Image: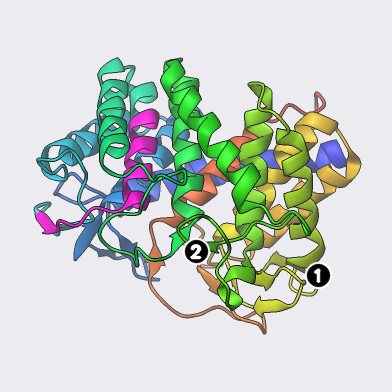
Amino acid sequence: MITKEIGQIQFKSREWLVNIAAPFWSRTGRTASGLYAEKLSRTGESIAEYYRTFVQARQIYAFSVAHRQDWDGPAVDQVQQTVNRLLSSARRQDGFFVHKLTHDGDVLDERADLYDQAFVLFGLAASGSLLEKSSLFDEAERLLDVLESRWSHSEGGFTEGEIVDGSIRRQNPHMHLLEAFSALYQFSGRQRFGDAAASIAELCRTRFVDADTGALLEYFEQDWRPLGDVRGRITEPGHCLEWAWLFEGFAVIGGADALAVSDALTGFARSRGIDAERGVAINEVLTNGDVHDHRARLWPQTERMKAAVSRYARTGADNEGREIIDAYRGLEKYFLADRPALWADKMLKDGAFLEELVPASSFYHISCAINELLNLKVAEGSVVPGTDLPR
């Protein structure tokens, strides 16, 4: 029964990605600058006041996924144009990539940020694979050269650049570096990227995960000690599950203790971070389990699904299969009923959604979760087109 339900949501997810979202965002979400719109109105009009570099890299990935899942739209041409624009317009003379471009694609905010660099690396991995250009992996190595020479930190990991408060260290950009290095290693086979991934994974295992609870901590001193105030006890269930998914993948290439880390992170997130009444993963709890932020953004729902898919692929356990289905049902709540190619981003405590523009950046989260789901092998005959699909 579980395999049949999973097969049904696989079919429904592919239909959404290939026949609804990708066609819509490739047209309405595309601008004359050769870049993707940052946001759309809730009625589907493009908002192109500026472009953040990391959002462009995320869209490169999303359309690479759509192509991989047999979308026959202009993914190759658009990705080629966007990556060319980033390399020509968003890179500084020192090799870092800027934070933001104008609506015409010129530099608007020249500051460099570690989070942005992580997604540029990720976009280079996706575009290098899609376009079959090893030169884009070379570009990733050049950026890694700059990161290592300019921002390496004596206590491990990297400093965060020129935008955020440098007195506080965060796990979040390092998580996306692991994601980028893992993708670069997968697509290029270059050992340097595999070694970089292993270094970040070890940093998480030894410094980011609270030994007493198995929770992922967010905010640290320079030496990776948790901050002494409440910020040092904040944990985000979505990030716990995202790291769990990354460690499931890292285990496949021989990562030491990776599955134990995944188990601890998943156990904490599921026991403390899922609101059973709303059926969603919430934003923040504390290490003692107290809720710190009851709201529920879209992206934790995708991380919940990715972790469940990877764990179901490894264990075949019914509870993991059920978690895939529950996570998918939680994610579906965010799609706009009258415009299914669009989504809400922030669910409030009462289950209502904040009325705001539609962020393009969420397409990366959704497409990544759908890609993981569609790559899952389930029992033959479980995908049943044309049936009533679970909501």
Say what amino acid the circle numbered 2 marks.
Answer: Trp
Work out whether mark 1 precedes mark 2 in sequence or the reverse, and give the earlier one. Answer: 1
- Inspect this view and state whether residue 306 appears: no
- Residue at 12 percent of width and 37 percent of height: 88
Measured as percent of width and height from the top left, residue 25 is found at 36, 50
Quadrant where the C terminus lies?
A: bottom right
- Residue at 33 percent of width and 63 percent of height: 39
Q: Choose between 386 and 86: the one closer to the eye.
A: 86
- Inspect this view and state whether residue 355 appears: yes
- Residue at 20 percent of width and 51 percent of height: 98
Question: From which residue to which does the magenta span run?
Answer: 107-126
Relative height, residue 249 to residue 112 (above, below): above
Query: Which residue is labeled 1 in the image?
Result: 276
**In the figure, is residue 102 to the left or right of 71?**
left
Quadrant where the N terminus lies?
A: top right
- Residue at 55 percent of width and 47 percent of height: 16
Label 2 secondary element: loop
Circle 2: is it few (<14), some (14-19), or many (20+) Cα within 10 Å?
A: many
Measured as percent of width and height from the top left, residue 138 is found at 27, 21
Q: Which mark is residue 343?
A: 2
Say what amino acid the circle numbered 1 marks.
Answer: Ala
**In the figure, is residue 382 to the left or right of 280?**
right
Magenta stretch containing residue 87, yes or no? no
Q: Which mark is residue 200?
A: none
Measured as percent of width and height from the top left, residue 95 is found at 18, 38
Q: Choose between 332 and 150: the one closer to the eye.
A: 150
Dominant secondary structure, magenta = helix
Relative height, residue 190 to residue 256 (above, below): above
